[in-house]
Structures are given as C-alpha cells and as structure tokens.
Image: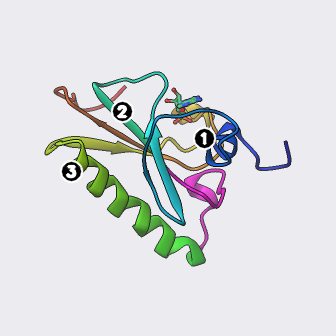
Amino acid sequence: MSEGDTLFSKIIRREIPADIVYEDDRALAFRDINPQAPTHILIIPKHPIPKLADAQPEDSDLLGHLLLIVAKVAQQENLSDYRVVANNGAGAGQSVFHLHLHLLGGRPLQWPPG
Ligand code: AMP
C-alpha cells in the first residue's frame, strides 16, 4: 500500500468488495459496513485527500460535488431528513484517512451528536 492508500482506495480499485450505490469519474458512494442508522452511506472522492483539513482551494469544486452527491443519493434512498458528517482527525472519530462524508438517515437523529 503506498502512502495515502487506504482501504477506501482498495474499494475504488475493486480490490475489496463494497455495496456501491453511486459512482462517477470523481466520486464513489457505498454502504457503511457498520451502519449507525438504517441508511448509512459513505461518499468519497476518488482522489485521496486524507481529511477535510488537508483539502486545498483547488479541491473546492470536488468538495461541492461530494455534497451534491449526498443530496442525490439521499433522494435515491427516499430520505427527506438526514445528517451529513465528516469526522476530521482521530479525536473526532476518524478511523479511515481518506476523506469521506457519512450520510445517515432512516431514524430520528438526536442533537447534539456524541
Ligand atoms: P470514520 O470513522 O469517520 O473514519 O469512518 C470510517 C467508516 O468506514 C466507519 O463508519 C466504518 O464502519 C466504515 N468502514 C470501514 N471499513 C469498511 C468497508 N470495508 N466497507 C464499508 N465501510 C467501511
């Protein structure tokens, strides 16, 4: 595995199976293996950015694209109410250092989150 290569890169390369619900040239969305809600989908860029804090101004179009995919996938999943989460850093719960957005829905979601 090269630097910046995580298990999400392996999913992109189809070296690890995943339940993929959306794909285009810049992004992939697949179901979380350990769902925290009835619908729990991860939206990732194919270009590996370790975490949100590492994103650069030139990534702004890609970041906007990821949010639009969240909305598209939520509609695909018939979700009207949902939460979008990006854990940034281990202390915030990030375990895979390939930027990803969590799409969570299908149950009432409490605020604030833990
Ligand atoms: P985070 O803790 O924010 O870094 O989120 C990483 C997420 O990846 C967790 O919710 C894990 O359950 C999920 N995950 C880990 N391995 C896999 C996998 N092979 N397929 C799908 N989701 C995974």
Could you tell me residue 62's position as x and y percent? 50, 69
**Residue lying furthest right:** 2
The residue stretch that appears in magenta: 43-56
Q: In which quarter of the image is ligand 1?
A: top right
Viewer-proximal residue among 21 and 68 = 21
Residue position for label 1: 89
Kindly indicate whether the residue at mark 1 contacts the one at mark 3 (C-beta within 8 angstroms).
no
Q: What's the residue type where badge 2 is placed?
A: His
| 101 falls in the magenta region | no
On-image quarter of the C terminus: top left
| 45 falls in the magenta region | yes
Quadrant of res 25: bottom right
Q: Which residue is drawn at 48% across and 62% down?
A: 24
N-terminal-most mark, 2 or 3: 2
Crowding at dot 2, Cα within 10 Å, few <14 / some 14-19 / many 20+, comes out as many
Q: Is mark 2 within 8 Å of ligand 1?
A: yes
Residue position for label 2: 40
Q: Residue at x 54, y 65 (%)?
A: 26
In 3D space, how far apart are the residues under numbered discs 1 and 2 (Cα atoms)? 20 Å
Q: What's the residue type where badge 1 is placed?
A: Gly
N-terminal-most mark, 3 or 1: 3
Could you tell me residue 2's position as x and y percent? 86, 48
N-terminal-most mark, 1 or 2: 2
Residue position for label 3: 75
